[in-house]
Amino acid sequence: MMNYKAASDSELLAELNKLSGDSSVGISSRKKEFLYVVRHLETDERAIAVLSGDLDGKKGTLILLTSINIHFIRISLFKKIHHDKFPIVLITKCDDKKGLLFSKIIFNINHEQEYVFSNIEKKALDKFLPRLNESITAYEALSYEQDEQQAPTSQPEITSLHSDESKPSILDTSSLVEKLELIEELKDFETINNKEFNILKNYILESNLDNRLATVNIKTLCEDLDRLNDFVNEGVITKKDFSTQKQALLAALPTNNQSQ
């Protein structure tokens, strides 16, 4: 078994190519995500299969299946790391929809969270699914064995995991701080100016206190602004186009009129 923490980048990337079958363009472009996550695996955790897709329209998420967990990892242009990890036993359902070239996969985690990945290479999904199904089946068999051995009054392990993975409330402080950090990064990279920063800050603070105002996903909005700014740098749209689209997005905030 490879020592992921001690291995060099070239050795780890060779492992990535081995897992992907040296044939997936999407997976090979997720090198930084793989290098990050594989070095943070548990001591007895080993990589089994990889996949790459777009999560909720946001491009570039690496899906890593290990002997213990399923990892969803994306590193934004700001180098911000988005990493979700769930024990395999919590994968309660997995559906796939195959197209001619690209496919979609949907993970249901513990009956309450759904992750939808699109733009997945069909051949990569065909390689990934058998390994995923094998892992889920193995854990289901192990869980059944443990349930048979336990007393009827004892709670299965999945129950405690369910309570630990509950979704944060609208007043969750970590969520508030994360959103403020996002818009601060946008300002630092001159994607938004001071006035636009204050509009976003006002919305984040007020919607955090009043659930009725929480009508816009601030994380998605920041990702969209970041990507539109990239389009300007790539020559896809002009600065004027970006400014127009940015104002339209900010105008959708229910607190915008109050801040002007």
Image: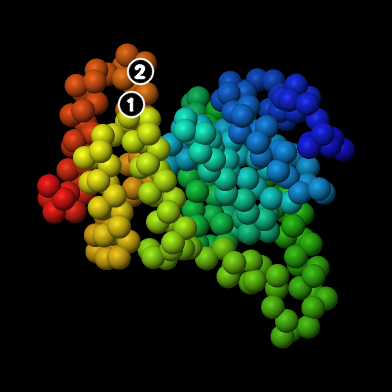
Q: Which quadrant would residue 142 be assigned to in this image?
A: bottom right
56 displayed left or right of 135: left
82 displayed left or right of 128: left
> Residue 215's spot in the image, x, y percent?
26, 55
> Residue 110's spot in the image, x, y percent?
57, 62
> Residue 183's spot in the image, x, y percent?
35, 42
* Residue at horizontal 29 percent and vertical 49 percent from the top: 201
Label 1: which residue?
229
Q: For the residue marked with disc 2, what is the amino acid?
A: Asn
Q: Are marks 2 and 1 in contact (CB under 8 Å)?
A: yes
Q: Residue furthest top?
A: 235
Per the image, label 2 sits on a secondary structure element best described as: helix
Q: For the residue marked with disc 1, what is the amino acid?
A: Asn
Inspect this view and state whether residue 223 appears: no
* Residue at horizontal 83 percent and vertical 76 percent from the top: 149
Callout 1: 10 Å neighbours few (<14), some, many (20+)?
A: many
7 displayed left or right of 192: right
Numbered circles on residues, count: 2
Q: Residue 233 got which mark?
A: 2
Per the image, label 1 sits on a secondary structure element best described as: helix
Q: Which quadrant would residue 182 be assigned to in this image?
A: top left
- Give the answer, above or below, for where 27 lies relative to 250: above
* Residue at horizontal 19 percent and vertical 53 percent from the top: 255
